[in-house]
Every structure is written in C-alpha cells, then in structure tokens.
Image: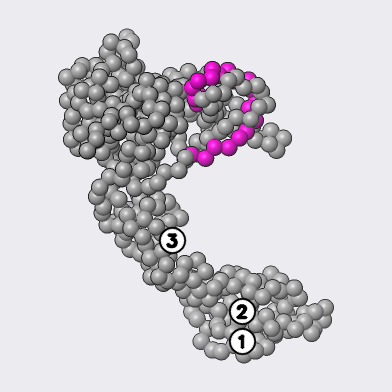
C-alpha cells in the first residue's frame, strides 16, 4: 500500500508549501474515509449521529386518510350549489375525532363533522374548514368554491410502507428523529462516534483558574475546539496543555494516535524555534502539507500518525476557528460516515472597502444586515487573527477568493453564513 506522501506525489498541482484552499479541501476529503465500527442505539441518542443503514418504512405515514383541518368531511360531488348564492346544505351524520374512528357509513348527501387528524371515512374526499362552514341545527351550510381533495391527507403521502424513509449516511437532526418516531422506530444502527484528541501547545499558556504570569495568556483555543467538536457529536479527549518540549509533545502525539481517530492541536506549526509539532508529525508519521494560501491560517499541518489523522492548527484564536470550519469540519463529517457538501456561499454587496492581496483566499469576519430591504455585509472591525471578539460579533465569513484583489464598497462578495457553525 502506498504511503500518504506517495499517494499525494502522484497528484497534479500538489505543493505542500502553499496549497490553495479549494485544493487542500479536495485533497483532505479524497484521503479520509469513514471510521470503522457501528452501534445500535435508542432513536433519541441518534441526534447528531449518522445512520449506518437504510431505515425502511414499516407502514404508511399517515397510516389512514385523515383530515388536515377541523371542519366537515364531504363528497365533492354533493356540493351542487343549489341553495342561496350557490350554497349547499347537507345533513350532519355525526362527529369524527382523532384516535376515534367514526364507525358508521356516511350516506351521500351528508357531511361529517371532523377534527384534525381524524380518519376520513370511505367515500368522503374533501374537507371544508369550519371557518367557512355554517352550522344550522343538524345541518351545515357549505359555501361555493370548495376544491376537490382540499385539506385531505392521503394515507402514505408522507412515507409509503416498504420504501426507504432515511438513507444510510444521513445525519440525524431533530426532523429525522421525529420522522423515525412517526414510524415507531425504537432503535437505529449508527456509525460510531469519532474519537478526537485535542491539546494546545505553548509555554505561554495558562490554565483557567490560575493567575496570569508575565507573558502568559489563558488557553482559549482548547475550549473553542471542544465546543466545535461537541456540536458535531464527537467523543472528545481533552489532553490539556502540552509544553514546548519535544519529548512531552512526542508522548502526547503517540498517546493520542493510539486511542483516537483524529488529533487536533493548536500552536507549534509555524517556523519558530519552539514550534515542534510539524517536525514531530513528520518523524512519527507523515505530513501531507503544512502551508495554505490563506489568511488567517497559513501555517496548518495535515497528516497522519499511525491510523490517526492529525490537524496541526495555528495558535491564533481566529485562525483556529477558520481552519477548523474550512478543513477539519468537512473531514470530520466524512469520518462520521457522511458525504459532506461545501458550506453554502451566496453573493452580497459589501458596505465597505476591503483591502486584499491576490494569491491567497482571505476569510474576513462579517456582519450580514438589511438596508432598505436588501442584504449587505460589513467586516466586524479589526481583523487580526488574535482578535477572537471578531468571531463573536460576526454572523458570517466574507470569503475573498484566491485571485481577487481589493474590493470597493458596493461590489458583490462571497459570504458563508455562520448560523449553526460558530
């Protein structure tokens, strides 16, 4: 079997020293594969997990023809409109409630008072909502203009028995959990959770709860990464802070690789004298690439140690989040058993002039807003990669493409919404 580097060396436009963002994303997804292993779990525990097998509908949903509204079930053919102003007057045969089928036959020329969700007896084909009908003793007056089949839910119109309700590889969101419950499904087969080890590197990092010493900063990256991984349903192993010591870093990497599917580190991947992560990655395993033509996040290492994939993210807080969402997140989705799709991008007018050098992709933190009924976007102030507040105040990324230069106010720019990400 070819090594990681042998595989990459055969590819066109592979340059580990400076890969465009789109090419790096393609390469990562071409290399990773779903983690092995499945487990059967109670349907509620499947939230944010990925189905490992198709779920076949055991019955029709809905199981019976039923009413979508409170009102009167009628035969459309009975709506002759022979009364005053085209109205139809029908006898009311009784009332049907949800969960209590109406047992008697409804004769032609009669209507049935019916509640939402109640079974519609055979022969009736149209529901007249109660807001337009007028009850007069034991009769009901139906106005003209009723459409055949209105407010009538057919058995199996949502799901048909014997057909796939959900396909393998589907992420189970609240809608899917509800759909499974509507079928009476108690347990589902899932891809096992991806095990991810996380640690920060750097002698300057101070743990929470301890007073800062001169030159120290609190370790925020590990908490940001924990939050992003938890939202993806990963099983997170927090390994704390590893000091800038080659032996300690080697021990941490080998321990993580022995027990986890993916390792995510922050810091230690640039070219400083104390930046050891990339060097250790290359010695203990393989480094596919370590520089991306982007801002922020240029020094980002991707590779493998044993059977564990490894992302060495930059140390600056914003760069950590940008590289996670652009590279780590899609890789994790594939490891989880999905076929990840690119985050949606749409075009919006910029409300400000934006400086940009061609030859790299830039991710600015932006704020989408409406002005005179049209969507516009503006950057969230200073864009330094250490200013985490710029992420907190943002609701989107402004994505300035690889070859693009400066942007004038009013020009269209590409935007990735952050809702559901950050």
What residue is rendered at 54% in x and 26% in y?
400
- Label disc, if present, on residue 93 of the rendered structure: 1
Q: Position of residue 290 (x, y in %)?
A: 34, 23
Q: Would residue 33 be found to the left or right of residue 75 on screen?
A: left
Above/below status of 152 relative to 327: below
Q: Nearer the viewer, mark 2 or mark 1?
A: 2
State the SS at label 3.
helix
Measure how far apart labels 2 and 1 are at the Cα level.
15 Å
Q: Which portion, as a residue range, is magenta?
A: 343-364
How many discs mark residues in the rendered view?
3
Which residue occupies the extreme right position in the image? 85
Quadrant of the rendering where the C terminus is positioned: top left
What residue is rendered at 54% in x and 37% in y?
345
Res 19 quadrant in image: top left
Residue 363 colored in magenta in the image: yes
What residue is rendered at 48% in x and 39% in y?
343
For disc 2, the marked residue is: 125
Crowding near the residue tagged with mark 3, few <14, some 14–19, many ≥20 C-alpha atoms within 10 Å: some
Residue 145 colored in magenta in the image: no
Asked whether residue 5 appears in the rendered view, the answer is yes
Q: Nearer the viewer, mark 1 or mark 3?
A: 3
Q: Position of residue 89 (x, y in %)?
A: 73, 84
Measure how far apart labels 3 and 2 are at the Cα level.
26 Å
Measure how far apart labels 1 and 3 are at the Cα level.
35 Å
Above/below status of 202 relative to 65: above
- Label disc, if present, on residue 179 of the rendered structure: 3
């Amino acid at each position: 079997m070819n090594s990681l580097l042998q595989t990459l060396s055969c590819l066109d436009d592979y340059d580990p020293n400076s890969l465009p963002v789109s090419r790096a994303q393609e390469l990562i997804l071409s290399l990773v594969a779903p983690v092995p292993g499945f487990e059967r779990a109670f349907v509620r525990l499947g939230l944010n997990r990925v189905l490992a097998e198709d779920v076949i509908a055991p019955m029709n949903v809905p199981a019976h023809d039923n009413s979508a509204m409170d009102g009167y079930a009628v035969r459309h053919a009975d709506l002759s409109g022979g009364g005053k102003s085209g109205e139809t007057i029908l006898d009311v045969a009784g009332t049907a409630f949800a969960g209590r089928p109406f047992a008697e036959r409804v004769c032609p020329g009669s209507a049935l008072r019916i509640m939402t969700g109640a079974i519609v007896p055979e022969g009736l084909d149209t529901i007249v909502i109660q807001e337009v009908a007028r009850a007069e003793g034991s009769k009901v007056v139906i106005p003209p203009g009723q459409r055949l089949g209105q407010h009538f839910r057919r058995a199996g119109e949502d799901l048909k028995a014997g057909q796939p309700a959900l396909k393998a590889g589907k992420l189970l969101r609240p809608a899917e959990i509800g759909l499974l419950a509507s079928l009476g499904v108690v347990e589902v087969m899932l891809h096992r959770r991806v095990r991810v080890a996380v640690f920060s590197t750097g002698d300057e990092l101070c743990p929470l709860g301890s007073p800062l010493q001169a030159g120290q900063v609190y370790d925020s990256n590990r908490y940001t990464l924990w939050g992003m991984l938890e939202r993806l349903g990963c099983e997170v192993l927090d390994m704390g802070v590893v000091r800038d010591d080659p032996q300690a870093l080697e021990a941490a990497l080998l321990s993580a690789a022995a027990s986890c599917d993916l390792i995510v580190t922050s810091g230690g991947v640039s070219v400083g004298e104390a930046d050891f992560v990339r060097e250790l990655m290359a010695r203990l395993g393989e480094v596919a690439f370590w520089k991306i033509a982007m801002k922020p996040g240029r020094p980002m290492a991707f590779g493998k140690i044993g059977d564990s994939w490894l992302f060495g993210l930059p140390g600056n807080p914003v760069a950590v989040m940008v590289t996670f969402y652009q590279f780590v997140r899609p890789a994790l989705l594939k490891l989880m058993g999905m076929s990840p799709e690119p985050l949606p991008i749409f075009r919006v007018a910029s409300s400000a002039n934006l400086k940009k050098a061609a030859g790299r992709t830039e991710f600015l933190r932006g704020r989408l807003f409406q002005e005179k009924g049209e969507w516009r976007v503006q950057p969230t102030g200073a864009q330094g990669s250490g200013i985490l507040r710029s992420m907190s105040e943002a609701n989107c990324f402004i994505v300035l493409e690889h070859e693009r230069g400066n942007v004038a106010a009013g020009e269209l720019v590409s935007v990735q919404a952050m809702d559901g990400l950050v």
